Amino acid sequence: MLRQKTPEGAEERLRVITVFLVNRRRSTKAPYKDVAYAFQTRIELECADGFYPRSDLSTYQSDDFELRLGDLHYRDVREYAVGRNTSAGWQERRDATNDPLPVTRVWTDFLPQQEVERVVPARSDGVEFGMEALARAAVSGAEAVSAALDSLPELYAEWRRGQEGMMTGLAPRRLKTGQALLENVDTAGSRIRDGIDLLKRDTVAREAFGLMNTAMAMANRRREAVIQKKLPGDVDPPTWRPFQLAFVLLNLVGVTDRNSGEREIVDLLFFPTGGGKSVSWTCRLCDCAEAAPRIWRAGCGHQRHYALHVTPAHAAGLVCALEFLRTHDDNGRKTLGEWPIEIGLWVGGAASPNNPAAKFFRQGRRDDLAEAVPEQT
């Protein structure tokens, strides 16, 4: 008999039943050892009254914020069985009124399946998400940027109010975790607003933002043209997903101001596969970080780092677009300088530039890099 308290303070009394399968077959000698094994066996239990929907409360009292965050996010998830050296499965059913019915069957499952729902970005009126339109706004000036982006922080604040309304009835520690998340939302909203203000007052940041949007649009059109078997000019105008544009804006101050305290912040975004995180926001923010220092005549502005699983073609497409903007006319060279915009792969100590290479890179001794890292590609 198991007694446990719920986050709300009530006490639950549960009867826990553990079932084992013991293989009593006699062992055999090679080459017939496998015939004595019990491979991926299945145990199935039935209970007419239904199995109890148990919540995982192991992290509710944790002092680790990440564990408490998981407890908050998955507070509505219930489990009816737990496997030992295997997973467990069950079938949830609902009646005609969509109310849950008791789970009467559970089983062991060596290969469980779970459908991950697709994340579909919402489109909001009053904010310009088109890359080419944002590039034109940056060229037009501060008023055009204001008209295109000023509504984004307000829409984010409106979403925040909706999230705050979902906190009603939370258990005390979960409520505290939720409040900490809302404080982070407020910080992110302030950084987004600061990024927009920077674009409105700083001509260099605005020009870099415009070049980044232009390069992204060019690369996107080329990529989609191949996929859709169309000419680049015939595909739909490329657009940002809302979180991508917000991510770029909230990092603009840290990218452009070397003394900004935001450079100590590590931002982490998580979406399921296909959400647009890896190739999209890393590459796009880096384009802005590349363009701004070149406009300042400070030379190379960003050393990109891509995990090997990131599709190289996406990164190469962005680099090619920026290099095209630099070389297609005199104004491009005037803006982005004489140094080529390049992409390369470093394979040194621990899959990163080794110590001599890092020293030469900091000192600008480009000719010594190949000698320091013979594996350079």
Image (spheres, grey):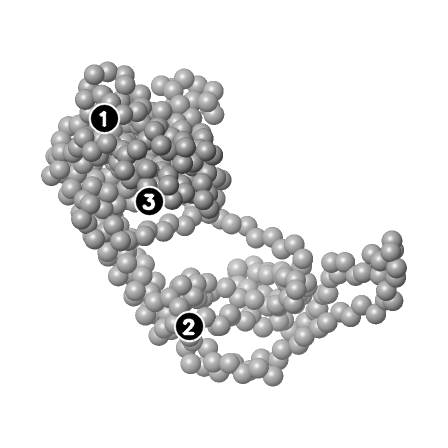
Q: Earlier in the sequence, mark 2 or mark 1?
A: 2
Element type at marker 2? loop
The residue sitting at 19% across, 49% down in the picture is 260
Quadrant containing the C terminus is: top left
Q: Nearer the viewer, residue 371 or 308?
A: 371
Q: Nearer the viewer, residue 53 or 30?
A: 30
Q: Quadrant of residue 100?
A: bottom right
- What residue is disc 2 on? 62
Asked whether, in this view, residue 211 is left or right of residue 8, the answer is left
* CA distance separating discs 3 and 2: 30 Å
- Number of the front mark, 3 or 2: 2
Place of residue 31 in the rendered image (x, y in percent of width and height, measured from the top left): 87, 53
Q: Nearer the viewer, residue 35 or 51?
A: 35
The residue sitting at 46% across, 22% down in the picture is 226
Place of residue 14 in the rendered image (x, y in percent of width and height, measured from the top left): 58, 80
- Number of the front mark, 3 or 1: 1
Labels 3 & 1 near each other (Cβ < 8 A)? no
Q: Quadrant of residue 281?
A: top left
- What residue is disc 3 on? 243
Residue 231 against residue 47 in the figure, above or below: above
Query: Would you call the spot at circle 3 few (<14 residues within 10 Å), some (14-19), or many (20 or more)?
Result: some
At label 1, which amino acid type do we have?
A: Leu
Q: Earlier in the sequence, mark 3 or mark 2?
A: 2
Q: Earlier in the sequence, mark 3 or mark 1?
A: 3
- What residue is disc 1 on? 336
Asked whether, in this view, residue 146 is left or right of residue 232, the answer is left
